[in-house]
Amino acid sequence: MNKIDLNYQFKGTDCVKMQSDKYTAIIAPSVGSAVLRMRDDKNDLEIFKFRKFVPMKTIEEQREIWGLPTLYLPNRFDKGVLKTSDAVYNFPINEEKLDNFIHGWVHKRAHEIECFSDENGKCVLITSYVYDEKDEMFRYFPVEFKISYTFTLSKDGLTQEIYLTSNSDKALPVSICTHTCFNAPLKDGGNEADMRLCVPVGEKCELDRRCLPTEKLLPLTDWDKEYKDGDKVPTGQPLDNDMYTAVMNSYKGKPFNGVIIRDIKSGCTLLNEVSKEFMFWNMWNDSGDKGYFCPEPMTAMINAPNLSLDSKVTGYRELKKGETFKCWQRFYTED
């Protein structure tokens, strides 16, 4: 079965519901094209953070911590400053406690549906947002761009392709992240303590008290190695901005670029595969007591444009007018 419903009501909001094989996904173009729910219906698995009785108003006010929100200019910029090769931009401070600008704004905008289909064994939805002088942030960042997402749901899971295109004569900084909010527990009726998280981490990126990189890359401690070895319990203890360089993982004896989440009691596994453009992982779980956790894939280091490190280390890059940056990720489960 492959079915797409463009008029699905989710908590009173117009959304797109896609169904294919054992998967269901609900996407909200009006809420930054966030994936607000994904389920493995066969195995009763709730992939992303979901709460039945939480109203949409709450989700809209806390967009970074529900489902799968995609962030452009994510995480933190020191004192709101972003330095490109041809300009310096000053964003308003929206993280007052740490004196930073955080998470960008495209996840807070209503996106348009470009096209859709439910043929050839899959459902496809393409959404986009065009950023120009009509956006209230343009006075801080007068650099036109278009960002679009292609969501494909099939027997192979949910794939998200992200395309960032420059429409400006000014250099467009590239830094993309998804604030991926995985549900805990994964299995309906399961236990959070039965979950194990495996993240392919290389070196730790030391952060200062304002959660900005010191530019030091550190060897892994025993705590860090729990991620690498797949032994980390992702809730019940705080994961507070543990940031790492990304390396290749392995799954069933083969290379696998991404995160592996297991429910050791049910035997179910959730996999989040990412493209090579995602060079960092940042771990966070909102103190560990709220039933979700976020292994966030990032294409660039926190505050990357402002660092003295080489771009090969930070992952930072820029686009010229007409150029497009692409990255992708996939979510799927195995029994």
Image (spheres, helix red, strand yellow):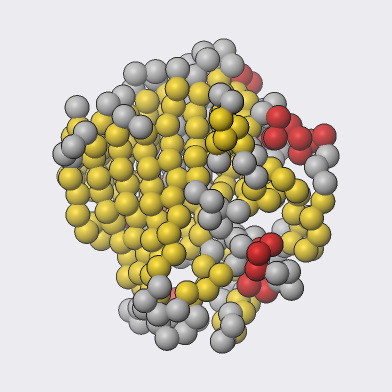
For the point 76% across and 39% down, which residue is it?
A: 224
Depth check, front residue: 240 or 227 = 227
Q: Image quadrant of residue 301? A: bottom right
Figure quadrant of the C terminus:
top left
For the point 79% across and 55% down, which residue is it?
A: 217
Image side of residue 100 versus residue 112, left or right: right
Depth check, front residue: 329 or 133 = 329
Q: How many marks?
A: 0
* Residue 265 coordinates in the image, percent (x, y): 57, 12
Say above or below: 66 vs 70: above
* Residue 197 coordinates in the image, percent (x, y): 62, 31
Depth check, front residue: 333 or 253 = 253
- Is residue 35 visible in the rendered image? The answer is yes
- Is residue 90 visible in the rendered image? The answer is no
Say above or below: 138 vs 194: below
Depth check, front residue: 52 or 32 = 32
For the point 34% across and 55% down, which residue is it?
A: 149
Image side of residue 168 versus residue 198, left or right: left
For the point 33% across and 22% down, which residue is it?
A: 41
Figure quadrant of the N terminus:
top left
* Residue 87 coordinates in the image, percent (x, y): 57, 86
Q: Image quadrant of residue 133? A: bottom left
List the single residue furthest toward the top. Answer: 265
* Residue 10 coordinates in the image, percent (x, y): 28, 40
Say above or below: 279 vs 291: below
